[in-house]
Every structure is written in structure tokens, then in C-alpha cells.
Image (cartoon, coloured by chain):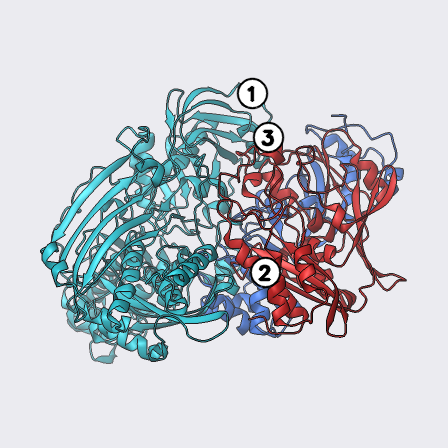
Chain colours: A blue, B red, C cyan
Amino acid sequence: MAPKDDSPDKTQDDRVNVSRRNFLKTAGVGSLATAVTTVGVAEVAAQSGPATIGPGDVPVTLTVNGKRLDLRIEPRVTLLNALRNRADLTGNKRVCDRGACGACTMIVDGRTVYSCSTLAIEVQGKQVRTVDGLANGATLHPVQQAFVDTDGLMCGFCTPGFVMATVALLERTPNPTLAQAKRGLDGNICRCGTFVRIMEAALKAKGVARA
Amino acid sequence: MKAFAYINPTSEKDAVAALKGDGVVMALGGGQDLLARMKDYVTQPDTLVNIKNALDATVTAMPDGGLKIGAAVRIVDLAGNAQVRRLYPAILDAAGLVGTPQIRNQGTVGGNLNQRPRCWYFRNEEFVCYKKGGSRCFAVNGENQYHAIFGNDGPSHIVHPSSLAVPCVAYGAKFRVVGPAGEREVSAAEYFTMPTLQNVLKENVLADDELLTHVILPAPGNVKTGHYEVRYKQSRDWPLAFTTVVLAMNGNTIRSARVVLGAVAPVPWRSEDAERALVGKPLNAETAAAAADAAVRAAKPLSGNAYKIQITKAAVKRAVMRAAGLATV
Amino acid sequence: MLNPQNPPPAAPSPAAPSPAAAPGGAPAGQGRGGGPPAPPPAARVADKYKWPARPTLITTSVKRLDAPDKVSGRAKYTYDINRPGMLYGKIIRSPLAHARIVSIDTSEAEKAPGFKGVIIHKTPGTEVLFQGDEVVGIAADTEERSYDIARLVRVRYEQLPHFANVEQAMAPDAPKVFAMGNTREGNREEAGDLDAGFKLAAHVVEQTYSTHVITHCCLETHGTVCEWDGDKLTAWVSTQGVHASAQQYADGLKIPQANVRVITQYMGGGFGSKTNVGAEGLICARLAQQAKAPVKLMLDRKEEQLAVGNRPSAVAHIRAGVAADGRLVAFDGQSWGTGGAGATSNFPLPYIYNFPNRRRTHKDVYINAGLQRAMRAPGHPQGCFLTEILMDELADRLRMDPLAFRIKNLPEKAANAMWEEYFTIGAKAFGWDKRHATGDAQSGPIKTGMGCAAHRWGGGGRGSRAHCDIMADGSVVMKCGTQDLGTGTRTIVTMGTAETLGLPMSAVKAEIGDTIYPFSGASGGSTTAAGVMPAIRMTAGKALDALALKVGPALGVDPQTLTASNGRVHVIGNPSKGLAWKDACKLLGTEPISVDGEWVDGLSGNGTSGVQFTECDVDIETGIVRLRRILTVQDCGLIVDKLLAESQVYGGIVGSLNFAMFEDRILDRNTAQMVNPNMEWYLMAGMSDIPKIDIILMDGPEQRARGVIGIGEPPTVSTSAAIANAVRNATGATIRSVPLHPHKILQAIEQEKAGGTL
């Protein structure tokens, strides 16, 4: 495979989805480049067109729970793994790793996503919310409090994903019908079987979820 | 998942150019299908081209009264689009039933149409089947309860996984495709390909260096439509069978009909038998039942999926009933 | 640990369940005949330590103490442990169902960037017996690279004959695949006079019934994080038993158990499959030793589905007779099942109901699939399903209401086995009187039906120890080396301590999930609450005794006359004569109270039971079943925390619903490789699949008097049978196997049309 451009000073711009064509014009070799020790680092592509970055480590800047996070990871690293393995944000869990269970559910620009099936590099410039950032200090988010009050959890491994799915549901549909609430939470699986009480929690938190 | 390089173009032209790179280069849409296949080492690209910033993400009204839907439109936005609701309710229904909220939020129209089969032999690395360059279809003598009951004469017995493909064919959609040689339009019915030994690695006519950019829907005209999906699990599951019917009416008489079946064949399966049973008949429960019987007459199930014939019948009958505005159960 | 499958004392099972299926017994059980050894006689609880007649916390609904940590993501599970310099371990497994390892080449892997270590787990020449059998372990500096490196390990195999299902293994011309034989005959169980029994029969039903293999599919996969400090190992393990894990590490690594510390603060589901650190645990420890760095080795979903446990299948060909008056008279059953590549598959049969004349044989059949492990009420869902479908068929022969028929054939009533009461209470609450006879006569494709079934479970527990510290500032710490699987152990340990010391929950700190705390057994067989709570009660009671020795003289009263309630230590019956808790503790001066205690007899019970009712709609044109509602009447002895007990019951019901409706481990019949080792095609219920569920917990003097008993398992036994019976009632077609896939429903309806399945 021909060497591709993954010089980090350029890839950093990717976080705001700046057009490759635009930033190539202004790209220079920044100081960060000296820190690059990874495989796959290569020269700037000579031809015009969007840059090829990776497959080695590249800088990726995320905005997670309102805070900027600077990482050096390969393009293949998922949003979930980036946060769990590189930023110790372990609230959201990895369970199926194939977008089938919902334990990794995060909210990106207001919508739930399976973070196991989302590349970290693709959410640069977007607002990522995880369960770790939901509570306000010691004060739980109303949805979290509702889960506590109704015992909408047992082992708790699906809980972060269900909490995020419920938050997103209620932010979009503050007063869902039972059918809407069920449909809204159909992307998550609980193995302990706490569904009845998760639904109680979702309905209890109706109208009180804050954005 | 194998390491890969990443390109993030912002125009169709750049995206097409990027696909021309070295090694195996693939387009990344919502990623819900592709990334899972990569994690399972079923697909191992050297480079991914993110096409979400390069392709149209809007729904546009066309002068003829139809709609043009960009391939980068998210399923959730399609399912909430007022024009789609008004003109193509079966597409809205199908979009609303795709996967889960998370998948609808991430998944794109192009990704849904181009996703690879969910066949469990295809999805597991251990089984080197026709679709992975092997020389057999493991479903024939294996676990084929979710496989095809139509179109089983070819080498592969997958069912096409796309929910949107079925109503697209039923509404007579065209797909706009761009490639190095420019753009072309392919009718939805011709876009999806029946497996032969020559083309079994793919499910459609899209070349490796081409992109599907738009779904172009003609003005629907005076039609009644119905869409019905049968699922085992209600929460999230792949349908066992589903049907879209689009009926052009002359009073209460069916003037012409399109009946397209999903999850039963390697392509969205147009049932001309069912269509013949509908044309010239009044739109009622009796006609629906006759169309259902006709729809499955030519079914050729595998060893373990004959039950899908009955389910397909129910889906056809109920889709017609819905078109007629009748209760389905 | 008592055999958790012991039936309620007054309701002996005609078929003693196999010890192989006992929780903690993992796939073992081979060669273990008979039951467990009789436990040594235990001390009997003194009157003063008995559970209070009018408790303040126990029996009420108390919120889960660690729920705030779990809903906020602060709770650190094994999967979440990130240690400085931590590496990532990965296991290379056999892709084949049966093969001999010819060669292993790790040279390319060792040259790859990020390589940190390799452990050859199975050497060339060794056989692998199922897809997913462990062969090599590697460690890498990042998780992504661990996947790359794992794929660079070259293992060559010589493929050997395999069995993908019991039919293949039982075929007369089957090759010998397993060294111990492809099948193993179990015990023959007989009672009464079978021939005489059948002579009394007015009706005989002869059919084959079966249940399938499902996997535990724990959301937190099996795995560990291992870190060495010299010759001392600290292991964070996703386990149901911290002390048991330490012992397994010591045995497996040949190191003193005193050098092993196991920590499990939070655990993402086990359901019986996490009672052994397994190959993955030992490989992780060895990689950490080799690389001189902490290693995290968590299985991925596919590994979890293939290699770390499943519920064995069960098939029984049964001939059963009933007399004209509705009394069961004879049962003749030949059963078999598979627990995979060498594990047992026994289950109780017939289940609950009295067949005075009976014979039953069982055969273990080995196939090339992952080994079974105890799974939530091992054996009982199988035995219950097989028996309860038969019961409805027999009832129909008699034209008798299936509930009345069941009541007529129950074993003798006992405090922990009051099925007649449960059925009566449940029938009223459920509206059983509105049930129609078999086959919904309404027109239209949607048919509605009701079904019921009964269950029992042993439970009970013993052997737990605890330690309680009371400091001069009034703080209280209760330490117990048990673990919280999500069942609420942390919460009930706190409740038991606070109840005994007359303190609010917030005044007590419970420390669990660590081998630095006193021994407690593995959590399996619903034994935790019954094992731990007596130890907590005794330890807290002794701590209070010690405090009373200081308070008595200060008050000028006999310490024996003191008790604690409402935050005061005071004379029994005279709350005003006493000291506030903090003032009492001040008397300790520089010497805190530090006492040990242990389980005694008399605070916990053994044996529990219940019944379930279901109502469902069946779409006879599509074969799709939709559940409308489920109701259970469940005995649970002295309820500790009502809120958490109810959660356990909900969970059990949903687990059984999944068994009935969705879950299915599907092996390719030709290769014995699993086609659905994921969570997409391994179907599990989501929110829209869950019906209305109502729970009636029996909570009267008879229940409370029996003390604490576990409740994790009993509710997961009978739902599946009740659902299948409801489907039968709706459609008139009998489904004699699970899962209730539309394929089967449509087929049964066809058969019914063609001449009947009755």
C-alpha cells in the first residue's frame, strides 16, 4: 500500500469537519508531528483531494460531556473503546460490540448512537454525552433518580445504556405514550430482566428530564 | 478489526476519487453494517471513505411531483419526513421499522440499500461461502430457517436485508449512481441482482468505485399502498417476511399493481403472480386473500423454511388489506 | 453449601437431581455419585438473635444502595478496571468443533508491534473438543493490537469427527468421538409398580417433549484483570465467588492461596456461569506474570457464547397414565440431553406432581459444543416444561380444568410448598375462571389463551462468616467476603446490620466483594441471602453484645437487658433508659469493637415454591405469539428487601420468557459451529416483548417463620411451561418443545388441522 498522509497537524482539523481541500492549503508540519512515533506515518499526499489519514495513531479531538479530550488513536478505534480504554470513561459498557444490545448507547448531537459502532474519528466536532457526565455532581439526573427509585436495574451493566436511551427519548418526547416509550427503548437489552421497572422509571421521569 | 486508513471527502467527486485508492477501499455510511463485518473479519478494507459528508443528506421535491432522497439522509429523518409521509407512506413505514432508534439515528438511506446480507454463514468468518469467495452455500444443507423461499435457483440463498429496497421497487424508484465515468440512473428493480456464480460476491450492480447518491421517486399518482412486516420479536428483529403493495386505482377497481416481497429472496421479490391476481379486481378482503395465495404459488423453500410461505401469504394479504383500509387481523 | 436443588422437605422430588447441575459444580459432576456429603451439625440460633417479630427494615422496600453508582457509571466492574501500564490479553480459540492441534507457530505474532507475551494453553498433540476451546493466549499493549497479534498466531489442526447434535451422537453407526464414550447411562429411578399403575389408567398419553440449549449470555463477559506484586496476585474477576476464585487461582497457578486477593465490587451478570475463573482467568494471570505488567482479559461476545456455559438440552419420551378420577397413576420416561463436550445433562423428572408408580432413565449425550454450566435453577426449567405440558394434555383427556387437575395431584402440603393456596390465590387474581377450553373458538386469526405451571427450588445456604467493627465515633463497618451479582447483596448486608443495631441504613458501611473479608461461599443456587444474612445477624448481634458490656455498667444495668433501636442502646422495653448510639460508642475509648460471627441454623430456610399464570395471543396466520400478561404467586420465606425481591422475580420471569420464546443456541448441523454467537441472531426480549407482569409474594407468619431464603432461581422455572400451555389453550395445538418459534407454532397448527395433536 502506498504511504498515505496522516500527519497529525492536519487530522486535528478533522474534528470540525473542515474540508480536506481547504485545510490542505494551509497545512504545514506542526510541532505535534515530532511526537509521531507510530506506524503508518507518511508524507503529505502530493495530489489534491482529501487526505488519507492512518492507519497508525492520529490525533483525535473529542468533546465529551462538554470537555475537550485530545487523544492519539488509530482510525479504527470506536468511540466506545476510545473513551473506555484511553480516557477511563467507563460508564458506558461494551457488551455485544456489534450494535445489538445498547449498553454502549451515548448521545451524539442530541441523538442516541451505538458507540461501539461509531468511529471516534467520526464524531470530532460533535457533542458527545455519556452516562458519566449525566449527573450534576452528587445530584442525579431525574432519569437516573427514577431508575434508583423504581429499582430499574439489577446487575447494572445495561443500565448506563438504558439511562442514556431514556434521557434521549424524554428530551425528544417529554410525555411519551406507553407505546412510544417502549419503541424508544427497543434498542437496548437487559439480561437480568428488569424491563418492567425500567419502563416504570421512564414513565416516572416523564416531563422532568432536562436537556 | 484490521487497521485501516481513513478519508473524509466533502464532495461526490472527491469521494469517488478516494474510492480509487490502493488496496481495498470501501465507503463508510452509518457504519452499522460495515463496522460489524470488519470486527468479524468478514470484510477487511485497507481504507474507509466516509461518504456522509460527501453525499446529499436532504430530501428534495422534484418538478414531476416526485422526491429525490439523498443517500446520506439518516433513516430517522426519512421516517419523520412529511413529504415522504404524504407521498410514499410505505417508505415511511419501512423506515420506521428499521432496526432500533440507535440504528435509525446512525443508519443512512444509502447504507440501508447497500448493506450486506445478514445470513449467519456470511457473517461468521468460519464459513467460507460463495459470498466470501468460497465454493458453496452452507445454508442449503444447513440452518436455513431465515433464508430464501424464492429465487433459490442460483448459488446463494440469502434474503436481501434492506427494508427500504422493497418499497423503493414497489414505487418504481430509480437510483442515481456516480462513478469515475460520470453518473447513471438505474431502476431500483434492476439495481439488485440475483446471484450467479459470476456476481455472487455482490447483491447489486454498484461497482467498487461507484457510489449510490440518490433515490429518485416518481410522482406516485393515484395509488393506494400498504406495507406489512411480520417479525418474531416485536422489539428488534429482522422481519421473517414483509410486503409492499402499490395499487393504481380506477374507482374501487385495481387498475395496476406492484407487489414486492421482502426477506424472502436474494433481491426484493416482485410477485407478478400476485399482481395478476389483483388487476381488474375490486379492492377487498377476498381479493387480498387471492393475491396472497397467488404470491406464494411459485415459492421453492429450502429444507427448513417452508413455514415462511405461510408467513409471506399473511404479509401479502395484510399489505393489500392495509391498502384497502381494512383491519388486518 | 447445601445442595441447592434439595426439594422442599415435605415435597420430595421423585427424581433426585444430578449433582452435576449444582451451581458451583460448573461442568463437573463427572463421577460424582450421590448427593453432597451431609453438612456437619451447625449451632442453633439463640432466641435473642432470632429475627425480630416486628422488624423496622427487614421485610420493607429499601432502595438498592449502590443504584446511584450504577446509574451514574461510577460503579467499576471488572471490565472497567484500568491499571497503569495495563496490557490487553486475548485468547486464540479453536475454530473447529473437534480437532487435534498439529502445530502452533507464534513467531510472527512475537515480532508484531505491541506484542507483550504469549501462553501456550494447549500444546500440539492435544485435542480441542468444541469451537471456542482455548489454545493460546497473547498480550499486547493496546486492545486493537491484541486482535492483530491474535490473528498472527498460526495454529494448524487435524480435523476429527464431530457431533453437532444428539441425533448424530446417538446414531448407531456414530464414530467414537469422546474417550469416555459418546453417551453415558445415568441412574435408573423407580418407585411403585409401573404395570399396575398403567392398569389403573383410563387415559394414557405417550409423547416426546424437549427443551433446547441456551447460553448464559452475561452482559459483562467473563474475564479478569490480573496484577502481580512480586509473588502476590491481585485479580479483579467477574465472578460469583471471590473466595472460590482465589482458591482456583492458587490451585491453577500452584501458589499459596494467601498470596491471592480477588476483588469483585460490581459484577455484570453470571446466572450460574461465573463460579470458576476458568482458562481465561489463569491465562490472564500467567500473561501478567510473563509480561510483568497488569493484564486485562475480557472475553468478547462470541467467546462468551461459545465457551463459558450453557443450559443443557433435555428430551424425554414419556408414557403417562391417569385414572378416570383424575389421579395420576403411572409415569414411564426415558430422557436424554446434552451438556456439550463431556458435561452432564440430568434434570428432575417427573416434576412436582405425584406419580405413585414411575420409572425414569436418563442418558447424557456428548456433542462437540461448549460445556454446560449451572444456569439459573439448573435442571428445573427442563423438568418443569416437560412435565407441565404433559399435565395439560392429560387434563384434556379427562376434560378437566388443568388447574383443578394439578391441585388433585400435588404432593403433601408444607409451609414451603403450598401450591394449592398459590394456585387458588393466583387463579382469582388472574381471572382463570374466564379461561376457555382448549382452542379459542373466536373467529379471526388472533387466538387468545391462558396457561399455568408450578415450580419449586431448594435454596438454603450456610457457612458464611462476617466481621463487624464498631468505632468510638459510632461508625459501623460490616465485612463479608460475599459478592453482589446484582441481586442486592450489598443492600441486604447493610439492612441486616442496621436492623440488628437499631441504626438507619446510612449509619452502616457494608464491605463485600473482596477476599480480604471473611469467607462466604459462591453465589449460586439462590444460597447467598440464606447464607449471608444469618452471619450478618449473628455478627452484628455479637457486636451489640460487646457494646452492651460497656453500656451496661455506665447505665447501671445488666448488659443482658440491653437492646438497640431507633439509634439508641437501651433497656429492653424501656427506650428512655439508655444512651444515644454515639454516646454509647464513646464508652469504647481507644478500643473499638471488632467481632467475628458466622452462620447458624435457624435464621434461614430451605425450599421454596410458586406458580405462574400466563395469557397470550397467537396469530395463527403467522405463528407469532405475543404475551399479554404474566402473574406469579411466589413463596420467599422471610423477605429481606421487598423491592429487591420483586426485582428478582421480574428477572426470573423474563429469563424464562426468553427461554420459551427467543433464545436458542444454533449450531450448524454439519460443522457444529455456532451460527448465532452474537446478540443479533441470539434473540432476547426487548422492551416491546415484555407483557404486563404481576407479582404476588406470599408474606405471612408461616413464611416469615422459616427465615431468609434466596429467590433468584425459583421464578425462572415455570414461566416457559405456562406460556406453552397458554399457546396450546389458544390454538388447540400442542407445542412440546421450546422455543416457541413461529415455525413450530404453524407446524403444530397444521398438524392439529390434519387430525389433531391432542
In the rendered view of the protein, which quadrant contains the C terminus of chain A? bottom right
Question: Which one is closest to the eye, mark 3 or mark 1?
Answer: 3
Residue C445 lies, in percent from the top left, at: 50, 69
Q: Is mark 2 on a helix, strand or loop?
A: helix
Q: What element carries label 3?
A: loop
Q: Using residue C681 as the reference point, say whether residue B327 is left or right of it.
A: right
What is the spatial separation of the Cα atoms under label 2 and label 3, in whole angstroms?
37 Å
The residue where tag 3 is placed is B134
What is the spatial separation of the Cα atoms under label 3 and label 1, in whole angstroms?
26 Å
Which residue is painted at 27% across and 36% down in the image? C183
In the rendered view of the protein, which quadrant contains the N terminus of chain A? top right
- Work out whether mark 2 precedes mark 3 in sequence or the reverse, and give the earlier one: 3
Q: Identify the amino acid type marked 1.
A: Glu
Q: How many numbered discs, if any?
A: 3
Name above or below for residue B16 compared with residue C600. above
Are discs 2 and 3 both within one chain?
yes
Residue B205 lies, in percent from the top left, at: 75, 41
Tell me the subunit letter for badge 1. Answer: C
**Number of the label disc, if any, that sits on residue B293:** 2
Residue C463 lies, in percent from the top left, at: 22, 52
Tell me the subunit letter for badge 2. Answer: B
The residue where tag 1 is placed is C108
Q: Using residue C454 as the reference point, say whether residue A127 is left or right of it.
A: right
Name above or below for residue B39 compared with residue A137. above
Which residue is painted at 29% across and 33% down in the image? C172
Which residue is painted at 11% across and 55% down in the image? C195
Q: What element carries label 1?
A: helix
